[in-house]
Every structure is written in C-alpha cells, then in structure tokens.
Amino acid sequence: MTRRFKSIDTQVVHEGEPQPRIEHAVAMPIFQSSTYVHSGETSYDALGYARLNNTPNHDVLHAKLAALENAEAALVTSSGMSAITTAILAICGAGDHILMLDSPYGGTRSFAVEDLPRLGIGVSFIDGDNPESWISKLDANSRVIYVESISNPLMHVPDLEAVVEFARKHRLVSMIDNTFTSPVNFRPAEIGFDLSLHSATKYLNGHDDLIAGAVIGRKDLVDKTLHLLNHLGGCLDPHACFLLHRGIKTLGLRVRKQNDSALCISKFLEAHDKVESVNYPGLESHPDHERAKRLFNGCGGMLSFTLAGDHEAADAFMSRLMIPLVAVSLGGVDSLIIRPATTAYASTPKAKREALGITDGLIRLSVGTEGVEDLIEDLLQALESYAQ
C-alpha cells in the first residue's frame, strides 16, 4: 500500500525506506560493495555497480529526496558542483545557450564564465527582478534558465514564478539551486520548476561531515543527468550515502530552528548602530520580503551583513567571535562565518565583484542550531569590542 504523509517530519524519516526493512534493521545498512551479481539487467545504467549510483544506499536516498520535493525523481552526486555542472551539461551542448541569474554562487559563476565558453556553450546573465528584460537575452539556441531560490551571498529572492512562466513560454528547462531553502522551506516542483539542485553538503546533511549533491525533478531530465554522471564518474560513496541519509532524518527539526534563529539575529543586527545593512528575506525591510513570504515556509539560516568600516573592521569583528567558526560552507549545526570576497568570490576581479554587491566588508553568517540567545550575546560582545 502506498503511504502518504502530511508532515515533512514524517517524510524525512519514513519516505523511501525499504519495505520490509533489510534483515529487519531499523537503520539503513551500509552496502560497502563496489559491484553486484548480474540479475539480467539490459541497460548500462542499471548494472549493479557503485559508480552507477544504484546501490541500495543510493536507491533509498533517491526515493526520499524525490518525495520531499514532491517531484518525479531524484539523484545524488559526489558534490553540489557535480550536481550543477552535470545537470547543465546533460541538457546543453556546443552551440547552446543559457540564461543565468546575475549573482549566483561563486563556483557556479566561475563555471559559467570560465568553463562553459570553452565547451561552446554561451551564457547571458539576467536580472532576477526584471522579467521584461529576459527576452532581450534569449536567442534561438537558448536551452536553460538557471536561478537560485535565495542567492548566495546577498540573499536575493528572484521572481521565481516568472522564471517558470518564461521557461514554459520559450521551451526552456528551468533549473534552480534550492540549497539555501531546502525542501522544508520550498519545493520547486510544486510551482513548476523542471530541476532542483542542491549542495547536499549543506542543509540536507547538516553536520559538516560529508560532500554531496542532489538533482531532483522531472524523471526524463534526472535520467539524462544520471546517464552523463555515470560517464563522468561523479558518484557518491555508499558510506557517504549513509551519512546523508541519517542527516536528512533531522532536516525539519534543524531547518525550522535555523529559520527562527536567523530571523532573530537579523533583527538584532539591523537595530545595531555598527551595522550598515542586513540581507535576510525574512526581514520586513528586505525588498523581496513579500515574495519570500508568499513562496517559502521560512527563509533559512543564511544571512549577510555589512559593518560600518572596511574589511579590516569585518576581520576584527569576526576574530572576536567565540561561537561562529570562521570557515566556508553552511547549513550545518555549527554556526559559520566568512567574508565572501575572500572565499567564493576570491577569483572574481574586484570591480566585477563589487558591481555584483560583493564588497570587501560583506560578511556571511550561516546560523547553526546553537541557542539564539548565546549567538546574539556573542555577536553583541564582538560588535562592541572592536574599534570602528
């Protein structure tokens, strides 16, 4: 009998689990085998081989992730960038063209600017708030429109409904990086996106102990991505699958806590006289607040802000923090803080970076699951102890 669960907290625990449980084990076992006895499979992608992403550990994750976003299919990969690059290359080839949000994650932007042109794939960057301008960037070879649910690191929410409408009208594949919202806050397939991409390293796993990615959406497109992934070799190890599977089971609990804490911290920072600006779509002052409130169940645990002063002031502030760790990545139980200008955008020329809004003094904070009162107290002492 097919079971349907109303709560995502039930889904993360029970969707996709083997029925009956394997050898009656409540926890999914780790199938640390590279190869499996041939059982009459007739297609390359169905052969029992760990590089083909089809061990029992993969299968459970694929079913669970598809259910969490109310999508047709899902696929896990070796990293978020593996998910992004493989999905794009599965759809586009030499001579094709992509429309891409003008301020994506730095790694995605570098791939678009440095690598896609070498493969003969053109890229035009678009203003996510101005759908009327997109038609001027379109050409006969356009195949994909690519956006993020919340942009990294400026926390902009593009006009996602317009993206879906534009893609349908012009027969484009709509792709969205849904890492920052996670399935708890937003399920792209429900408003018509073709593919949703994740760095599963972040919220889906939530414990800063593995690297993984995910592609979720239309089955035909997920199958095309899987076929290319199997050639490129971006497989997720079964033990990493086990860790990701375990991490997903607390996704709802973690993300709702992070939603609440990030909003409290954003309000605190917005009111402090040493903070010039705060980027968090949960704030009523954020230009995309109404859009975020309409589309999302919460705005996630990511925020960014700029202090009065230059990058030296930002570094001095971060050095005085006791709880957030100065480290890249995000979405885990530990709060992490960085300056994007020195990390994801370090290879972007300064003029271009600043034109995108990534200034030297911009600070990005990934709010973990620590007590919000402790985090605010720590931020306060750091703000008050550095010389502006």
Image (cartoon, helix red, strand yellow):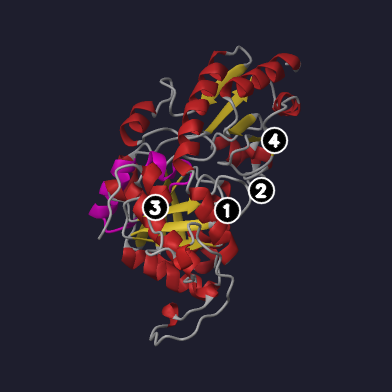
In the rendered image, the quadrant that contains the C terminus is top right
Position of residue 212 relative to residue 376, above or below, is below
Choose the circle earlier in sequence order: 1 or 4.
1
Mark nearest the camera among 4 and 3 is 3
Choose the circle earlier in sequence order: 3 or 1.
3
Q: Secondary structure at mark 4?
A: strand
What amino acid is labelled 1 in the image? Ser
Q: Secondary structure at mark 3?
A: helix
Position of residue 195 relative to residue 296, above or below, is below
* Residue 92 shows in this picture: no
What amino acid is labelled 2 in the image? Ser
Residues tagged 1 and 2 counted as in contact (Cβ below 8 A): yes
Choose the circle earlier in sequence order: 1 or 2.
1
* Residue 69 shows in this picture: yes
Q: Which residue is mark 3?
A: 14
Position of residue 366 relative to residue 376, above or below, is below
Per the model, the C-alpha gap separating discs 2 and 3 is 43 Å
The count of marks equals 4
Q: Which residue is mark 4?
A: 325
Choose the circle earlier in sequence order: 4 or 3.
3
Q: Which residue is mark 2?
A: 347
Q: Could you tell me residue 150's position as x and y percent?
A: 45, 39
Question: How many residues crowd around disc 3 within 10 Å: few (fewer than 14), some, or many (20 or more)?
Answer: some
Q: Secondary structure at mark 1?
A: helix
Choose the circle earlier in sequence order: 2 or 3.
3
Q: Which residue is mark 1?
A: 110
Observer-nearest residue: 187 or 67?
A: 67
Mark nearest the camera among 1 and 4 is 4
Per the model, the C-alpha gap separating discs 3 and 1 is 38 Å
Mark nearest the camera among 3 and 1 is 3
Per the model, the C-alpha gap separating discs 4 and 3 is 33 Å
